[in-house]
Image (spheres, rainbow, N blue to C red):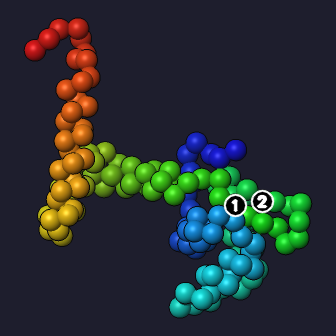
Amino acid sequence: MPPERVPDLGPLEFSLLSFLWQRGSATAGELLEDYNSRAERPLAYTTVSTLLTRMAEKGVLEVDKGRQPYRFTPSVGREQVLRQRVRDFVGTFFGGRMFDLAVRLVEDEPPTEESIRRLEAVLEKHKAARKRRPRKGGRGG
């Protein structure tokens, strides 16, 4: 059963989880091959195996021990992890104000026309949803 809150993951753990999201499931050897084919500093099999065992203990991976070698499958989704990490980041650096992060991102790197259209569509969707919500307190105005 996946954890409600994804435990903190180190950079290597996150990299291995990213490979698993792409593959669906893999053995330690397959992940080692994937990782080392793109890494500046290759990892040893024992390092990958240890990381996968820790990740399973944290509840972010399921392990099929019914076959050799063991097969690992993510028990948390990419969106779940990304949403949580963004919320944690915003909580730490922006006092929980998501909008302040959005403004900072737009100020630091002006968006393309396509990005502006996407952002406007999201804002319109939220605006429409707000209009449909009943007001709190029972009084209009």
What residue sits 82% from the left and 67% below the top? 70
Query: Is residue 42 shown to the viewer in this render?
Result: yes
- Tell me: residue 7, above or below residue 41: above
* Residue 10 x, y percent position in the rendering: 55, 67
Label 2 secondary element: strand
Label 1 secondary element: strand
> Where is mark 2, residue-wise?
63
Q: Badge 1, how many Cα within 10 Å: few under 14, some, many 20+?
A: some
- Tell me: residue 93, above or below residue 138: below
15 on left or right of 115: right
Q: Which quadrant of the figure contains the C terminus?
A: top left
Q: Which quadrant of the figure contains the N terminus?
A: top right
The mark tally for this picture is 2
Displayed quadrant of residue 58: bottom right
* Residue 114 x, y percent position in the rendering: 20, 64
The amino acid pointed to by label 1 is Thr
Closer to us: 66 or 125: 125
Q: Badge 2, how many Cα within 10 Å: few under 14, some, many 20+?
A: many
What residue sits 45% from the left and 56% below the top? 82
Q: Which mark is residue 114?
A: none
Mark found first going from the N terminus, 1 or 2: 2
> Where is mark 1, residue-wise?
73
125 on left or right of 5: left
What residue sits 23% from the left and 8% below the top? 138
The amino acid pointed to by label 2 is Val
* Residue 88 x, y percent position in the rendering: 41, 51
